[in-house]
Image (spheres, rainbow, N blue to C red):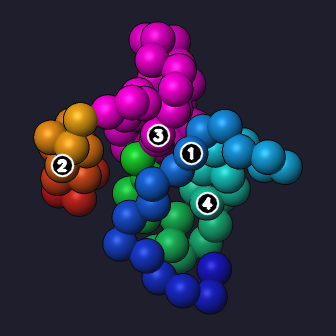
């Protein structure tokens, strides 16, 4: 919260706090920090996984492994 970020690349499966919980915590903040674009990075590539990410407040979803072009498109989309 002490720093401002242009974008967050959020790993969905992390120890202690997963990416879904972290995204919900960011979206619950007060002020402009809550609106930072969040791009999910996950090995879960099913449609329902992408839907969970969007429901949590993530802007887009990139399944791993990914191609660099996919990352560039997702970043551009999130930063619009």
Disc 4: which residue: 26
Distance, label 2 to label 1, CA atoms, is 17 Å
**Mark nearer the N terminus (3 vs 2):** 3
Query: How would you rate the neighbour count of disc 2 (Cα within 10 Å): few for under 14, some for 14-19, many for 20 or more?
Result: few
Secondary structure beneath label 2: helix
User: Compared with residue 37, is residue 65 higher up or lower down, i.e. above or below?
Assistant: above
Disc 1: which residue: 11
**Mark nearer the N terminus (3 vs 4):** 4
Tag 3 and tag 1, C-beta contact below 8 Å: yes
Q: Nearer the viewer, residue 30 or 14?
A: 14
Report the disc number at residue 41: 3
Q: Nearer the viewer, residue 31 or 40?
A: 40
Report the disc number at residue 68: none
User: Compared with residue 2, is residue 77 higher up or lower down, i.e. above or below?
Assistant: above
The magenta region covers: 40-66
**To which quarter of the image does residue 71 belong?**
top left
């Amino acid at each position: 919260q002490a720093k401002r970020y242009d974008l967050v690349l959020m790993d969905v499966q992390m120890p202690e706090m997963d990416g879904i919980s972290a995204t919900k915590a960011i979206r619950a903040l007060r002020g402009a920090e809550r609106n930072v674009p969040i791009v999910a990075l996950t090995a879960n590539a099913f449609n329902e996984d992408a839907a969970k990410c969007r429901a949590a407040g993530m802007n887009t979803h990139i399944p791993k492994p990914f191609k660099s072009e996919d990352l560039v498109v997702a970043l551009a989309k999130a930063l619009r």
